[in-house]
Image: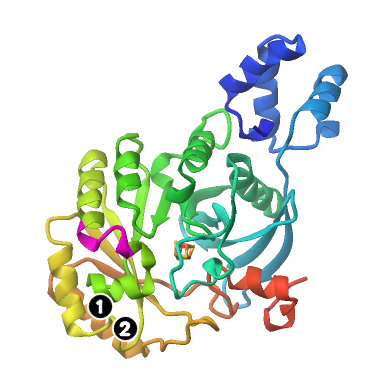
């Protein structure tokens, strides 16, 4: 296990192996998670311990290799290179209340949603807790900011990398480290119902978002293969359990695809599906990718759909298209970068 993926307790327990007292473990935790460092030459740990750790243990590293800055707002889309040269992407957004960062949890994804570029090459591997933390730390160091909200909505299905994601969130929450409240963390899932129940039983008030995108099982199954395993009813019933356990509101991400899920019957279906659940619908105008060239509804059609939902008593907002001049949704930057198509992207480098 990478040293910077370990909790303070685990680092303390490791110290006798190197004939050191437990407090050195606390110093290491501080070095990795308060000072946000990975290079021992920049710390003041005993030379002998450093030599032994470098010889015997692994430390995760992540670096920002590309930044695509919006010219119309302060959004930045970023590419991160991991220690094994795999690449993942993320987004930094500035809101009135502070900075939100969307991070990746896997290299690629095996969930196969047809509208998503991240899954086109399948799952390459899971990210470790440290590789998720370092996406946040590197951004904070580069821009001299503090990220207040972390959203697990980059490449990967977070609940398909459950143990590493949970450990990452606990480390992010640690008051001696980043000290982020669980309420400021959002897990976005395509709907792995049994993992939602498992997450509810952790009793951590993490915000849960479901990628719903359609209102009936046949249509949803065509765009999201996970629906063949967990039907909409299974996901909603897991959400009710989660919402009751955490007294929280569940967000439903709904990408509007013209002619497919944006008519009145879809609004009525949403009303039926979400009845009795404390919910919020986040409407996302489709951002077409090469492999899924469906039509984005016109602005007035999006507004109409929202009004229909509101008339039915549902809570809905249209996602602000931050960084809309950067031509890339989840997974597209990485694929373009790997193919060397960077000229298509508004790069600040
Ligand atoms: S939308 Fe999310 S779960 Fe679906 S393929 Fe893309 S990364 Fe995976």
Q: Is residue 229 magenta?
A: yes
Label number found at residue 319: none
Magenta segment, which residues?
227-233
Image location (x, y in percent) of residue 122: 55, 63
User: Would residue 279 appear left or right of 100 to someone viewing this image?
Assistant: left
Confirm whether residue 14 shows in the render: yes
Confirm whether residue 34 shows in the render: no
| Residue depicted at x 48% and y 53% | 152
Please tell me which residue lies in front, 304 or 255: 255
User: Would residue 265 appear left or right of 166 to someone viewing this image?
Assistant: left
Q: Where does label 2 land, which residue?
A: 302
Circle 2 packing at 10 Å, graded few (<14), some (14-19), many (20+), is: many
**Local SS, label 2:** helix
Image location (x, y in percent) of residue 223: 37, 74
In the displayed structure, 116 sits above or below 81; it is: below
Tag 1 near tag 2, CB within 8 Å: yes
Q: Is residue 235 magenta?
A: no
Image location (x, y in percent) of residue 143: 68, 55
Q: Where does label 1 land, which residue?
A: 306
In the displayed structure, 252 sits above or below 346; it is: above
**Local SS, label 1:** helix
Q: Can you say which quadrant of the picture contains the C terminus?
A: bottom right
Circle 1 packing at 10 Å, graded few (<14), some (14-19), many (20+), is: many
| Residue depicted at x 23% and y 47% | 243
> In which quadrant of the rendered view does residue 89 lie?
bottom right
Image location (x, y in percent) of residue 23: 67, 13
Please tell me which residue lies in front, 83 or 125: 125
């Amino acid at each position: 296990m990478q040293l910077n993926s370990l909790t303070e307790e685990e680092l303390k327990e490791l110290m006798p192996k190197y004939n050191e007292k437990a407090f050195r473990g606390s110093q290491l935790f501080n070095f990795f998670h308060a000072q946000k460092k990975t290079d021992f030459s920049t710390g003041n740990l005993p030379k002998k311990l450093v030599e032994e750790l470098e010889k015997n243990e692994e430390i995760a590293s992540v670096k920002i290799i590309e930044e695509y800055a919006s010219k119309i707002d302060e959004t930045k889309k970023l590419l991160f290179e991991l220690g094994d040269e795999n690449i993942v992407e993320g987004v930094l957004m500035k809101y009135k209340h502070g900075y939100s960062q969307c991070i990746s949890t896997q290299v690629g994804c095996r969930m196969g949603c047809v509208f998503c570029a991240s899954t086109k090459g399948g799952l390459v591997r899971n990210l470790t807790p440290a590789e998720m933390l370092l996406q946040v730390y590197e951004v904070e160091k580069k821009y001299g900011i503090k990220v207040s909200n972390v959203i697990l909505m980059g490449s990967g299905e977070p609940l398909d990398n459950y143990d590493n994601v949970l450990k990452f969130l606990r480390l992010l929450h640690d008051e001696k480290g980043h000290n982020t409240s669980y309420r400021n963390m959002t897990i976005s899932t395509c709907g792995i119902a049994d993992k939602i129940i498992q997450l509810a039983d952790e009793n951590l008030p993490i915000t849960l978002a479901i990628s719903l995108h359609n209102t009936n099982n046949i249509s949803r199954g065509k765009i999201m293969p996970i629906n063949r395993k967990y039907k909409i009813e299974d996901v909603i019933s897991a959400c009710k359990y989660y919402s009751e356990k955490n007294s929280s509101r569940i967000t439903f991400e709904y990408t509007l695809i013209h002619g497919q899920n944006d008519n009145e019957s879809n609004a009525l279906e949403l009303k039926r599906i979400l009845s009795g659940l404390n919910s919020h619908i986040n409407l996302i105008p489709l951002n077409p990718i090469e492999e899924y060239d469906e039509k984005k509804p016109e602005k007035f059609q999006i507004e109409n759909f929202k009004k229909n939902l509101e008339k039915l008593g549902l809570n809905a907002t249209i996602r602000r298209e931050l960084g809309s001049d950067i031509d890339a949704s989840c997974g597209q930057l990485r694929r373009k970068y790997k193919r060397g198509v960077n000229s298509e992207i508004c790069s600040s480098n």
